[in-house]
Amino acid sequence: MEERYSRQMRFAPIGEAGQRKLKDSAVCIVGMGALGTVLASHMVRAGIGRVSFVDRDYVELSNLQRQMLFDEDDVASGYPKAIAAERKLRRINSEVRLEAIVADVTALNIEDLLQDMDLVLDGTDNFQTRYLLNDACFRLGIPFAYGGAVSSRGMSAILVPGVTPCLRCFIPAADAGGQTCDMIGVLAPAVDIVASYQSVEALKYLVGASDERRNTLVTFDLWDNHYFEMKLIKPTKDCPCCQLKQYPALDPGEQTSMLSLCGRGTVQIAGSGTLDLERWRSRLESVAKVKANAYLLRAELPEGERLVLFPDGRVLVQGTEDFARARTLYARYIGL
């Protein structure tokens, strides 16, 4: 331990005692994209004992500009992001216990995914999932390191149940049609800075440096050279999460079987059961150009769209954001 983490241990606020605390800690990263890959690299290199990460997507060429754990081989292989990340991270630090989970995070599985975690790191790219994380973390009493990056802008805060307000207190509602990386782009340095803010606050929390934790929401714009910190306000008295304990995002009735992945020309359909990829490969090969691995199957349809099937039952319909069109193709090739 002394050699691998020597430079970190020589940093007095961590030291040998802090390094032991990190080794005994468990963190969960939700989303293994731009933020998530940087977060995972920091956590694994820092010697966190157990690092779990969950992501529903697979590696594509457009990811390589900012998603630091992936390369062209991952694109060619078509691996899920969680699996590709695990392969890289194991070569970085074999001492860390890694748990790669290929799944969509929903109200039905979020609390199971976060069980026994000391901290949750936000690597997501949409507020629907962030509110889900926020509500689950405050219900379970787990700190939540929030982060977001788009264009040249970023923001971050660490939210601690019982100490700080929750995400809903200062961002009570988010526009579902707001700006995303797929719509207006993102600069990789902005992602790195946000993830670094999240990571250092995670280290502070895990080693017990509560007095040094930042109690502000930091926002910045690298291109226009803006920086601002907003002190975390007192909880909103009628907040449905941290005050009223209603946790609206955890209501299974709020879940939908269809979800448009904004700006990506993709509709996700949850499906009603698991999918045997070998069976579906043999079914679809006669009507589509099929590529498959152990984790997913991609079928190029004669209509021009693409189906991506996952063992957990999810199907991505790529090439449209129209629910009716996606449902038609799903029914035609998968069935209802």
Image: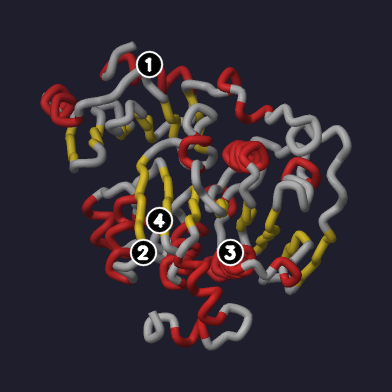
The reply to whether residue 66 is visible in this rendering is no
Asked whether disc 1 touches disc 2, contact meaning CB atoms under 8 Å apart, the reply is no
Helix, strand or loop under label 1: helix
**Quadrant occupied by the N terminus:** bottom left
Asked whether disc 2 touches disc 4, contact meaning CB atoms under 8 Å apart, the reply is no
Q: Which residue is mark 1?
A: 328
Q: Which residue is mark 3?
A: 206
Q: Which residue is mark 2?
A: 96
Percent position of residue 163, x then y: 77, 52
Vertical arrangement, residue 124 with respect to residue 6, above or below: above
Percent position of residue 29, x then y: 49, 52
Q: Earlier in the sequence, mark 2 or mark 3?
A: 2
Q: Which residue is mark 4?
A: 62
Q: Earlier in the sequence, mark 2 or mark 4?
A: 4
> Relative to residue 62, is residue 333 drawn left or right?
left
Kindly identify which numbered label has been placed on residue 245: none
Residue closest to the far top: 336
Q: CA distance from mark 3 to mark 4?
A: 34 Å
Mark 1 vs mark 2: in front: 2
Helix, strand or loop under label 4: helix
Name the amino acid, label 4.
Answer: Ser
Q: CA distance from mark 1 to mark 2?
A: 45 Å
> Relative to residue 100, is residue 300 drawn left or right?
left
The image quadrant of residue 329 is: top left
Mark 1 vs mark 3: in front: 3
The image quadrant of residue 214 is: bottom right
Task: Tell how many labels.
Answer: 4
Return the residue nearer the eye: 301 or 154.
Answer: 154
Return the residue nearer the eye: 192 or 95.
Answer: 95
